[in-house]
Image: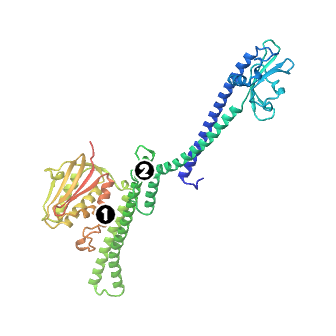
């Protein structure tokens, strides 16, 4: 059955139920009609036999009636008993009246008439020639001289029931055919939304994950709720696919950058050792310069390795990397101002509250001071590196919207919207330069800063625009009490 379509299976089920319903209905109606026919005949026979049982058995009920069929036949038809028999006490037929329209061969045999109970119970009898059935009832004569038997053929009743059965079968068959055809088209129309869902699923399977199931039905219907659920699932699938694609792209970029970051110092170390092994380093000064280069690149490799390990540990178990204790961000802000002035004495550095308020405010947090100091150092170093010498820098600290805030704002060239969205990516540098002039770092500082902020349950936000400087704001849960 599973090889047939849903439409065919539903139609077969519906047609089967309809056929069963028609069969049950027809059976019940025929049964009720048969009962009605029998009750009508039985009532007529009982009434007629009761009346005729008072008639003396040794004479006809209507003297000379058998000689006048033109009067007898309508009377018997009216009374509903075209055959009346008087049986003597010994069971022999004493007298009787029969409609002239009935053949003697079609009458019940006299021996059969003797078996009819005399308590008024109606019974079915067979004709003598077996051509049909009779309905009969018997009553004892009032004078005790015999029995009165009234009978009527069931030919007309059986013919009526037969015609009704035939009509029921024909009309039921036609109705079944018409409703089956109508059901085929109705089911096709009703299943149209499922076909649209099928086409949408096929398009998605073909690679178009932007497809959605259209509004094919009211949200209150089963199809409508199914479409809504599928659309919700498709949105999640699309986001998952896009997220996976973005993750794979970031991973490829990350691997490429790591490879480059490792290759450069390794190339310097390898080249210096090869020169020494081949005797290319002549004199103490050349050897000292080569050793200095090896030491510098080894330090870079060590720092890069430590940064990568820290990021990996923060990704896996961020809270385990922290040694929390109560502290105030104002300590870090004050130290950051001193550090920035030491890096560039010509640079104006001001200490304010969040958003440039006049005075800094308290910012108590429960955090790892050493890790937060690393975050602030990265932000201050970023401001010193990417803004011209002498560019003013503002360090703000305090409470904003119930959270402890520390921000580093500069009046430098700022960043574009695309740069701002990627500035926290690992190994990202706004100019994408591969040089290391001026001691440029590997591009992990802001990524580490963001991971450390997340580990503390906080965020780092960047507000920037081209020509309007940049504001890096650390927001952490404020320590209450």
Secondary structure under tag 1 reads: loop
Res. 321 image quadrant: bottom left
Secondary structure under tag 2 reads: helix
| Residue hosting label 1 | 425
| Residue hosting label 2 | 227
Camera-nearest residue between 458 and 244: 244
Q: Which mark is residue 298?
A: none
Q: Position of residue 355 (x, y in %)?
A: 17, 52
Q: Position of residue 290 (x, y in %)?
A: 30, 80
Question: Is 285 situated above or below 373?
Answer: below
Camera-nearest residue between 242 and 3: 3
Question: Is 146 situated above or below 24?
Answer: above
Image point 72% across, 23% down: which residue?
72
Res. 432 image quadrant: bottom left
**First in residue order: circle 2 vs circle 1:** 2
> Alpha carbon of mark 2 to alpha carbon of mark 1: how far?
38 Å
Q: Quadrant of the C terminus?
A: top left
């Amino acid at each position: 059955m599973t090889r047939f379509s849903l439409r065919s299976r539903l139609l077969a089920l519906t047609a089967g139920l309809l056929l069963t319903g028609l069969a049950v209905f027809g059976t019940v109606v025929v049964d009720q009609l048969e009962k009605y026919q029998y009750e009508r005949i039985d009532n007529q026979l009982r009434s007629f036999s009761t009346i005729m049982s008072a008639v003396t058995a040794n004479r006809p009920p209507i003297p000379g009636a058998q000689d006048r069929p033109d009067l007898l036949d309508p009377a018997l038809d009216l009374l509903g008993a075209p055959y009346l028999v008087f049986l003597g006490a010994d069971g022999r037929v004493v007298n009787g009246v029969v409609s002239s329209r009935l053949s003697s061969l079609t009458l019940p045999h006299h021996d059969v008439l003797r078996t009819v109970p005399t308590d008024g119970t109606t019974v079915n009898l067979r004709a003598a020639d077996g051509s049909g059935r009779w309905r009969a009832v018997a009553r004892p004569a009032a004078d005790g001289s015999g029995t009165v038997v009234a009978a009527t053929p069931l030919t007309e009743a059986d013919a009526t029931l037969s015609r009704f059965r035939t009509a029921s079968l024909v009309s039921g068959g036609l109705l079944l055919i018409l409703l089956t055809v109508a059901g085929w088209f109705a089911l096709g129309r009703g299943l149209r939304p499922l076909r649209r869902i099928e086409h949408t699923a096929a398009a998605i399977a073909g690679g178009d994950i932007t497809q959605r199931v259209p509004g094919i039905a009211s949200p209150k219907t089963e199809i409508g709720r199914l479409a809504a659920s599928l659309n919700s699932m498709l949105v999640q699938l699309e986001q998952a696919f896009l997220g996976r694609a973005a993750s794979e792209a970031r991973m490829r970029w990350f691997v490429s950058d790591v490879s480059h970051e490792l290759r450069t110092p390794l190339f310097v170390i390898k080249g210096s050792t090869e020169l020494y092994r081949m005797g290319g380093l002549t004199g103490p000064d050349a050897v000292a310069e080569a050793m200095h280069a090896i030491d510098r690149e080894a330090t870079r490799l060590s720092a890069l390795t430590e940064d990568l390990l820290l990021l990996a540990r923060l990704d896996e178990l961020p809270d385990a990397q922290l040694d929390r204790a109560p502290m105030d961000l104002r300590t870090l802000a004050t130290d950051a101002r001193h550090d920035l002035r030491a890096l560039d004495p010509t640079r104006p550095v001001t200490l304010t509250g969040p958003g440039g308020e006049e005075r800094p405010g308290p910012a108590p947090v429960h955090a790892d001071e050493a890790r937060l100091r690393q975050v602030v150092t990265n932000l201050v170093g970023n401001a010193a590196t990417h803004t011209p010498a002498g560019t003013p820098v503002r360090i703000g600290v305090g409470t904003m919207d119930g959270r402890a805030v520390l921000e580093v704002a500069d009046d430098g060239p700022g960043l574009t919207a695309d740069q701002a969205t990627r500035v926290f990516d690992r190994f990202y540098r706004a100019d994408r330069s591969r040089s290391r002039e001026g001691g440029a770092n590997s591009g992990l500082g802001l990524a580490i800063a963001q991971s450390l902020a997340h580990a503390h349950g906080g965020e780092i936000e960047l507000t920037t625009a081209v020509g309007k400087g940049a504001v890096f704001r650390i927001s952490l849960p404020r320590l209450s009490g």
